[in-house]
Image: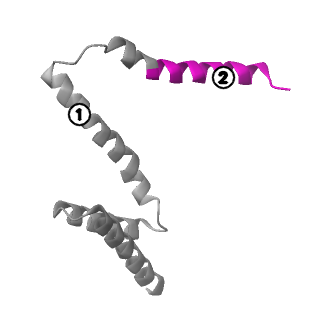
Amino acid sequence: MISMRFLICLAVMASVTYLLRMLPIVVLRQKIKNRFLLSFLHYIPVAVLSVMVVPAVFYASDSIVSAAAGFAVALVLSFFEKSLIQVACAACAAVFVVEIIMKYL
């Protein structure tokens, strides 16, 4: 049988999720004209994505050294505006090579 605590937690989670999705639609019915707010909202997806991805990069491999090498390769290649496939493949290759080198050291 489902406990009352579980049902209360489920109701709270459902209402919070619903409110977070419903409030922007209700509050922001008209077009936003403030340039500062528009520029702020423009950078939110990039900031959220980087906050989620960067820590995950350093925990994806067996050691921080190989993760940092892959991250450095990805940063350099993205600075030179290479494609996403090239950056991802080169970063994976860098992590692989560093892991192999560290295995024999």
Residue sticking out furthest to the front: 30
Give 52 or 66, whichever is nearer the viewer: 52
**What residue is rendered at 29% in x and 66% in y?**
87
Residue depicted at 29% across the width and 61% down the height: 84
Reply yes or no: does residue 13 show up in magenta.
yes
Residue 57, located in which quarter of the rendered image? bottom left
Q: In front: 28, or 80? A: 28
Q: Is residue 57 left or right of residue 9?
A: left
The crowd level at tag 2 (other Cα within 10 Å; few <14, some 14-19, many 20+) is: few
Q: Residue furthest left?
A: 35
**Given the image, on which type of amino acid does mark 1 rest?**
His
| Residue under numbered circle 2 | 9
Q: Give coordinates of residue 30: x percent, y percent.
A: 26, 13
Q: Position of residue 83 (x, y in %)?
A: 25, 63
Give how far apart the Cα atoms at labels 1 and 2 are: 33 Å
Q: Is residue 96 highlighted in magenta?
A: no
Disc 2 marks a residue whose amino acid type is Cys
- Total marks in image: 2
| Residue that appears at 80% across and 23% down | 3
Identify whether 11 is placed above or below 41.
above
Per the image, the residue denoted by label 1 is 42
Which label lies toward us, 1 or 2?
1
Q: Is residue 9 left or right of residue 33?
A: right
Q: Earlier in the sequence, mark 1 or mark 2?
A: 2
The residue that appears at 38% across and 12% down in the rendered structure is: 26
Magenta residues, start to end = 1-21
